[in-house]
Amino acid sequence: MKKKEVKSTFYEYTSLSGLSQKQQQLVEEATKAATNAYAPYSGFHVGAAVLLENGHMIHANNQENSAFPSGLCAERTAVFYANSQYPNTPILSLAVTAEKDGSPVKYPIPPCGSCLQVLLESEKRHQTPMEIILYASDKIYVAGSVEQFLPYAFTSINLKGS
């Protein structure tokens, strides 16, 4: 038997001032997007913003539906839109934030498993690491790629079966 360990690296900040100007702008876009989320059932408003290699920023939010699970998370909404409008342009960075009852959450919320799988696919598709910024009022986490969240991810290699 062999023991294997997996290590993830995140950087933690306590204020936006520790982030670069582009990172701060991306967080601001995600925060704006969260306010427009359609979340009448959970009251949990999530915003996401992506920075593309061409400099464009795209923001999106979660969209709930009474017929669960027909809604869509903010992260997937943003990435699917970016990939549909700019199919050959890598996503360099993604910021995610949330609010509950009109106030920002205190601790960063990570993307759900489905979103992580979509983010990883986009990262692999463009062969470019996607920085992930998770913003909350008390802490900010920054990871250099989606692989920090999914060290044993399911990818196209697994579909080959060999």
Image (cartoon, rainbow, N blue to C red):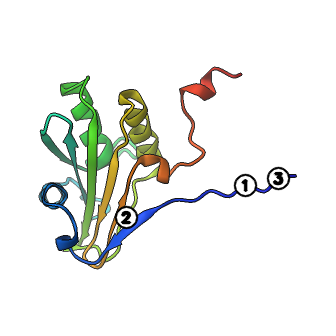
Q: Amino acid at mark 2?
A: Ile
**Residue 158 position within the rendered picture, expressed as x and y whole percent measured from the top left:** 62, 28
Q: Which mark is residue 4?
A: 1
* Residue 124 found in image quarter: top left
Mark 2, mark 1: which one is toward the viewer? 1
Which badge, 3 or 2, comes first in the chain's sequence? 3
- Tag 3 residue: 2
Q: Residue at x 16, y 61 (%)?
A: 24
Viewer-closest of 65 and 73: 73
- Tag 2 residue: 109
Which badge, 2 or 1, comes first in the chain's sequence? 1
Left or right: residue 113 compared with residue 162: left
Q: Is residue 151 visible?
A: yes
Verify CB contact (< 8 Å) between mark 1 and mark 3. yes
* Residue 154 found in image quarter: top right
Give SS at disc 2.
Answer: loop
Q: Residue at x 28, y 49 (%)?
A: 94
* Residue 72 found in image quarter: top left
Q: Is residue 35 above or below residue 160?
A: below
Give SS at disc 1.
Answer: loop
Verify CB contact (< 8 Å) between mark 3 and mark 2. no
Q: Is residue 13 above or below residue 123?
A: below
Rate crowding at label 3 as few (under 14), some (14 to 19) or many (20 or more) other CA atoms within 10 Å. Answer: few
Q: Residue at x 88, y 52 (%)?
A: 1
